[in-house]
Image (spheres, rainbow, N blue to C red):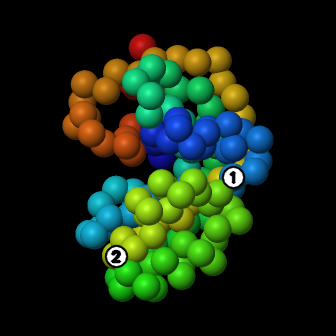
Amino acid sequence: MENVVYVDHKAGELERLVSGEKTIVIRGATGRKLPYGRINMGDVLYFIRNNGEGLVRAKAMVDRVVNSARMTPGESKRFVDEHAAGLQLSDAQYKKWAGKRYLVLITVFNVEDLEPFKIDRSGYRKRDDWLPVGDIDSVKV
């Protein structure tokens, strides 16, 4: 399965993934929403900055996925703290994710820059930051 993932431009998330400094992508919510339970080892992630440019700039392979059980805010913060080295979260990102009931940690490898390309998002809700595209060629413009 291939997925398009929006990453935090202000935090330099894409650059840190490409450099290898950051090895874990995080998502979370009060309920079990994408990508919870829908991402697996061997899947491919394509990264776009959340700055409005709409260009896929890098890709990575999924090495490991951890879907948390329901957590209290304190448990969630401890969970994020335990993975801080791989997550490399900015203060704003920490505030956003730590404390969520459900978290998904996706460890990636083989992160590589790509020749930038646009995708067609018309089949997806505007505010989604995780798009399960199946095959990237089906949305490539």
- Choose between 2 and 77: the one closer to the eye: 77
Give the residue pinned by disc 2.
Answer: 101
Q: Position of residue 84 (x, y in %)?
A: 64, 68
Q: Is residue 127 above or below residue 109?
A: above
Q: Nearer the viewer, residue 76 or 25?
A: 76
Find numbered disc 1 in the image and state the secondary structure of the residue it sits on.
loop
Residue 114 located left or right of residue 132: right
At 48% from the left edge and 54% from the top edge, which residue is drawn? 92
**Residue 3 horizontal side relative to residue 31, left or right:** right
Q: Position of residue 56 (x, y in %)?
A: 53, 26
Residue beneath the point at 67% across and 37% down:
15
Q: Can residue 41 be seen in the rendering of this structure?
A: no
> Looking at numbered disc 1 in the image, what kind of residue is underneath it?
Lys
- 96 vs 32, left or right, is right
Q: Residue at x 34, y 56 (%)?
A: 34
Q: Position of residue 74 (x, y in %)?
A: 43, 85
The C terminus lies in quadrant: top left
Viewer-side residue, 22 vs 11: 11
Q: Is residue 55 visible?
A: yes
Reply above or below: 119 against 82. above
Q: Amino acid at mark 2?
A: Arg
Identified at 41% across, 59% down, the residue is 96
Disc 2 to disc 1, how far (Cα)?
Answer: 23 Å
As drawn, 82 above or below 6: below
Badge 2 vs badge 1, beta-carbon distance below 8 Å? no
- Name the residue that disc number 1 marks: 22
Q: Is residue 1 above or below residue 83?
A: above
